[in-house]
């Protein structure tokens, strides 16, 4: 799990969670719309939509804006037909990179992502080259000041697979379809859920032991993350706290 959690920590320390609220809103609205198109507009019967709906609400997207995105996804309102696509490649140091995007023109987005990889110092790979190294999971976080036993008791009973400390939070992983059930159990148990999302967890990580290599990797990931069609970027690297502090200073 460290590959994902470390990248989340890096983004936090670098102050790069999102350069603008408008860009974050646009990504979240797209995710809601596509989830509704793929699984229907009822969050109770579409767990992916419910997760994306809650993620948008947690990030202060107005409820009316979310409902309009659902309506566009189900065809009740006119909208752009976004398609979910993924791209795979490598960053320096042999780090595997998995990119998720939503596009209205696959023929445009693919070449653009390849160009981003190349210009940033990475390389795009063929489909399937790195996807096997990642698994889709639900990922939730709760404050780290809660006793581990309290988190475990509520989460495991609701379907959680693993609980791990990461910085100042507990990270809980589960099957993607159990994400909201675990969230509901934690909330009903009186715990604050800081985030509940779907993610890709690497099966193993590449240990990065130099600031120069770390900087090169982050250059690739930042460039990909900055593309308008890109929703998420995952990579299987781990950077020591010492190097992380050096980069963020």
Image: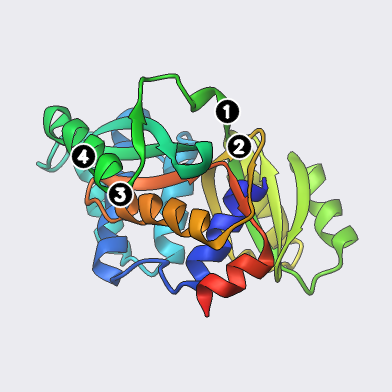
Query: Does residue 231 appear to the left or right of 180 in the view shown?
Result: left
User: Considering the numbered disc 3 on the image, is that residue within a helix, a strand or a loop?
Assistant: helix
The x, y position of residue 182, in whole percent, is 68, 48
* Element assignment for label 4: helix
Q: Earlier in the sequence, mark 1 or mark 4?
A: 4
The residue under the point 34% across, 34% down is 123
The answer to whether the residue labelled 3 contacts the one labelled 4, judged by CB atoms less than 8 Å apart, is no
**Considering the image in quadrants, where does the N terminus appear?**
top right
Q: Which residue is mark 1?
A: 133
How packed mark 4 is, by other alpha carbons closer than 10 Å (few <14, some 14-19, many 20 or more), is some
Mark 3 vs mark 4: which is more N-terminal? Answer: 4
Do we see residue 83 in this rendering?
yes
Residue drawn at x 51%, y 53% is: 213
Q: Circle 2 is placed at which residue position?
A: 202
Question: Residue 67 or 198: which is nearer the viewer?
Answer: 198
Residue depicted at 30% across the width and 39% down the height: 101
In front: label 3 or label 2:
3
Residue depth check, mark 2 versus mark 4: number of the one nearer the observer: 4
Looking at the image, do the residues carrying marks 1 and 2 touch, with CB atoms under 8 Å apart?
yes
Residue 70 visible within the image: no
Alpha-carbon span between mark 3 and mark 1: 22 Å
Residue extending furthest toward the left:
78
Provide the secondary structure element on which disc 1 rests.
helix
Q: Depth check: give the residue in front, 236 or 42.
A: 236
Q: Which badge, 2 or 4, is on the more N-terminal residue?
A: 4
Real-space Cα separation, disc 3 to disc 2, in angstroms: 22 Å
Q: Dot 3: few (<14), some (14–19), or many (≥20) neighbours within 10 Å?
A: some
- Give the residue pinned by disc 3: 120
Which residue does the numbered mark 4 point to in the structure image? 115
Q: Is residue 76 above or below residue 29?
A: above
Real-space CA distance between mark 2 and mark 4, rounded to the nearest whole angstrom = 25 Å
């Amino acid at each position: 799990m460290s590959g994902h959690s470390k990248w989340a920590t890096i983004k936090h320390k670098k102050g790069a969670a999102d350069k603008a609220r408008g860009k974050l809103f646009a990504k979240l609205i797209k995710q809601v719309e596509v989830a509704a198109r793929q699984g229907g507009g009822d969050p109770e019967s579409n767990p992916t939509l419910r997760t994306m709906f809650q993620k948008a609400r947690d990030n202060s997207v107005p409820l009316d804006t979310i409902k309009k995105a659902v309506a566009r996804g189900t065809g009740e309102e006119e909208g752009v037909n976004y398609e979910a696509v993924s791209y795979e490649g490598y960053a320096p140091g042999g780090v595997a990179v998995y990119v998720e995007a939503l596009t209205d023109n696959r023929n445009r987005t693919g070449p653009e992502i390849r160009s981003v990889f190349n210009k940033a110092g990475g390389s795009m790979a063929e489909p399937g080259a790195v996807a096997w190294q990642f698994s889709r999971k639900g990922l939730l976080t709760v404050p780290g000041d809660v006793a581990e036993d309290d988190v475990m008791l509520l989460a495991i009973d609701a379907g959680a697979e693993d609980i791990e400390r990461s910085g100042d939070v507990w990270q809980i992983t589960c099957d993607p379809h159990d994400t909201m059930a675990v969230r509901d159990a934690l909330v009903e148990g009186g715990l604050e859920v800081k985030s509940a999302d779907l993610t890709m967890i690497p099966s193993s990580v590449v240990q990065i032991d130099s600031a120069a290599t770390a900087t090169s990797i982050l250059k690739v990931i930042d460039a990909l993350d900055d593309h308008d069609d890109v929703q998420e970027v995952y990579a299987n690297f781990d950077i020591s706290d010492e190097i992380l502090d050096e980069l963020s200073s």
